[in-house]
Image (cartoon, rainbow, N blue to C red):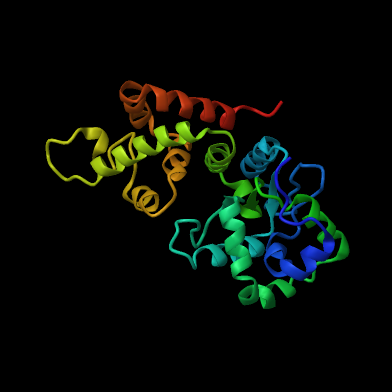
Amino acid sequence: MRESLTNSRETVRKLVIGCISILGLLGAGTGKAEAQDVTPPGEEAVNNTRERNLKALRAGEYLVLDKVMAILNQVYTIFPTGLGLKNAFGYYLDQDGLKLLLSQKAKFDEKIKELNLSESEMSTLEEMFKIGNIIFGHRSINDPNFMGLLWHERIHKYMAEDLSAEEKRLLNGVKDFFMHNFSQSTSSIEPIFKVGNPGTFSKFQLDYIVNAKTDDFWSILAEGNFTNVESYIAEHFPEASAIYKRMKTKATAEKK
């Protein structure tokens, strides 16, 4: 069982009511995310996308109100750690991220109080706000690229929870190799390392990876459209490629 952020209602109220509440209104306690009425009526394509994305969510993957996600983004972007973006769609809640929330509790108390959480919402938080969960803002569920965003966060989760120290070392070595070569500007460098080339990373993605944790290299890779990078890794780093393929297969598997 994954570690819970809180062990009792009293702990919730005294220690983390401010920060924990930014993830209020998570949905039902069944492990299935429930969206509110966010789909414009009469738009069949949007409806289809929304239904597909909702069906893809697994236990431990939830939706929060967009205004709640906005507060969460404010918390994370204070820190130069690569944890957050100003307009992030979702997060994997790891231990480091939750510590940051707690460190900013006082700063966000006033905004959190405006949510007016009920007793039932507090109970929902106690049950569902745990290290290891994945959350998204409601707006993301209508995004055609949602599946890539979902796979991205799942890779974060698997790297934190499923890999051995040796496996993480192998992946970190490959990430460092790529980042070193992407930083070179010689004309003789292989096309795979030229920023913006088809099948490789954009400058925005590279800038984010440079300032982020090791697993963001692999999380972004799992979003898709990076076949050239994946092929290069498979050829030159077969052990790391096998680890990555195992994670990606698990991340992209359809829910049974």
Q: Residue furthest front?
A: 165
Which quadrant, please, contains the N terminus? top right
Q: Nearer the viewer, residue 192 or 210?
A: 210
176 sits to left or right of 158: left
Picture coordinates of residue 213 (x, y %)?
44, 49
Picture coordinates of residue 114 (x, y %)?
73, 75
- Seen at 55% across and 41% down, the residue is 160
Task: Say above or below: 47 vs 98.
Answer: above
- Seen at 74% across and 60% down, the residue is 24
Q: Residue furthest bottom?
A: 110
245 sits to left or right of 6: left
Residue 195 appears anywhere in the view: no
Picture coordinates of residue 80 (x, y %)?
43, 63
- Seen at 42% across and 52% down, the residue is 212
- Seen at 57% across and 56% down, the residue is 97
Q: Quadrant of residue 232?
A: top left
Which quadrant, please, contains the C terminus? top right
Q: Nearer the viewer, residue 181 or 88?
A: 181
Picture coordinates of residue 49 (x, y %)?
62, 40
Q: Nearer the viewer, residue 165 or 255?
A: 165
Q: Residue furthest left?
A: 187
User: So how many labels did they put on this image?
Assistant: 0
Q: Quadrant of residue 200?
A: top left
Residue 83 appears anywhere in the view: yes
Task: Say above or below: 8 vs 44.
Answer: below
